[in-house]
Amino acid sequence: YIMCMGAAVWWLSREYRDRIRLAESLKFEKQRVRDIEEQNQSKLRFFFNVSHEIRTPLTVIISLADSLIKEMSCTGDTRNKLMGIYRNCSQLRSLISELLDFRKQEQGHTHIHARHADMSALLRNTATLFTEYTLGKDITLQIDVPDQLPMWFDPKQMQKVVSNLVSNAIKHTPQGGMVTIAAQTDDTKAVITVSDNGSGIAKEDLPHLFSRFYQARNIETVADIGTGIGLNLTKGIVDMHHGTIEVTSEDGQGTKFTITLPTQREAFAADETTDEPIPTDNTKELPSASDSAATSHSSSANDSSNTPEGHDERPIILIVEDNDDIRQLLSTLFAPLYRTRTAVDGAEALEMIGDEMPDIILSDVMMPNVDGLELCKTIKHDFTTCHIPVVLLTARTAVEKKLEGLKTGADDYITKPFNNDVLVSRCNNLINMRRLLQRKFSQHPHHEADMLATNPMDKDLLDRAMGIIDRYYSDSEFSVDTFAREIGMSRTAFFNKWKNLTGETPKSFILNLRLRKAADMLRERHDLSIAEVSYANGFSSPRYFCKCFKDTYKIQPSAYRNADSQQSAQ
């Protein structure tokens, strides 16, 4: 019995020790895996943060090259050199964008917004981007697509797919070779192929071609080395479109990529489609950047500030940017259209806003002291400044970062590197839209208040103001002082706020409102005399009413009534 019990105790203790050793070994292995993953993630974060920082100097280079290319004096050999700079910088931008897109896809932040568009147009437009590149390598780029290929897809994401495949095909095609882009469709699916007669891919590499960071083994030159993420990103985008991508290749004979995509909306989930048209950037009242550059080559930021304030009616833009090169670039870019003011961070910008109210603010997000998000939040939560449009400019492209900026009240969000014309057009559209809303509010103040007020504080001000005007409308003693007192603000603060919000002074706004209502009464109430109409609309005397009416409508009230009566009779 003693021997059996001893054997049992020995066996149990050994099993217990083995289990403890196994558990500790498993725990150590899991911790080691976590440490390796954390180390890899920290390396990736550093790598992608550096990629973000590269966007800032790249933005300056591309924008300056674009500006120089547009100058009429830039011709011949100089223009060709600038085109080379611009083309290579654009290629570098696409590589950085590919890295950042890969990171977003890896973290699950990439989503598609499929819309009804023409795939043939996208294929042709993408192919034109590589025309000069293929000419330089003596490669024939053949496009065999239908005249139109309407289907449902995300144009922005699919352009990345086509660009990646065409770029890879050209890279691995020798001089004198051919790259072909073809497409065909039936009722339910579209088939897009990108093929070349280049070096091809070895059979052992084909199963791993879409794997992350995978590099083919038959690399002949340093120029053939890629990042190993382009095809992985391409497959991810095709999978999000509920399609498939396949590759066939023979070593030394060429490669063919075949993409099969659904064409109907029913293939996508409800949150993957949108009926909004492809966004475009158009200007209405303010001229475009290219038009201004053609007429104002010699304009600069300093020149715009030398114009007398009383004679310069251009809107004021406050540019907040900590990078000296980009701040100077933006100041020069907006000088022909705006009176430019600059600040190096949010703290200085807030001080400048207190001294001079800008019409629009263009701010970087990442800045010392007070960053762009905090600046925007402060502006939008301050009653005196909440009406100012704010455009945030940043290298962060993640959707959650854009949402964070828009939730602070930003009116627009633009990523670096930016296109000069697009940036100017976005700012122009915000200014022109505000002017349009101000004119509509001036004509129909009781109906357009909700559209003019972009935040609750401005809406509350307009609602209270219209209630006060309705209450004191017929009182000839109603003045700006009374208006400000009823609102609960000082006369100066109320005057500045009302002028910036509506585009009119309080006195001018009340006078125009009274004249419009008087004109309506002259047309509709023929039983009232001119004097009765003037007193009913709050004018102190008929003579003053006739003077104001003639100054505004260029006609006497009696002649206005008679002309309207004759027109009605006819």
Image (cartoon, rainbow, N blue to C red):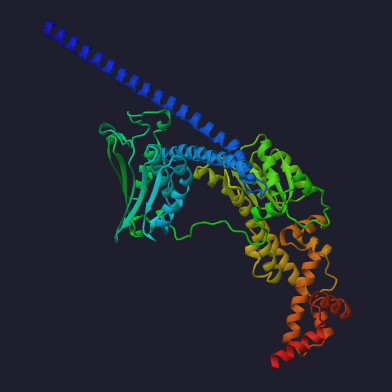
The quarter in which the C terminus is drawn is bottom right
For residue 441, what is the image quadrant?
A: bottom right
Query: x, y (%) of residue 369?
Result: 67, 35
- Is 194 or 11 nearer to us in this picture? 194
Relative to 173, does residue 552 appear above or below in the rendering?
below
The quarter in which the N terminus is drawn is top left
**Residue lying at 45% horizontally and 61% vertically, measured from the top left:** 275
**Residue lying at 64% horizontally and 53% vertically, measured from the top left:** 290
For residue 449, what is the image quadrant?
A: bottom right
**Residue lying at 57% horizontally and 38% vertically, measured from the top left:** 85
Query: x, y (%) of residue 44?
Result: 46, 30
Residue 435 horizontal side relative to residue 239, left or right: right
For residue 266, what is the image quadrant?
A: bottom left
Toward the top, the furthest residue is 3
- Is 455 or 177 nearer to us in this picture? 177
Relative to 124, does residue 449 appear above or below in the rendering?
below
Residue 76 horizontal side relative to residue 465, left or right: left
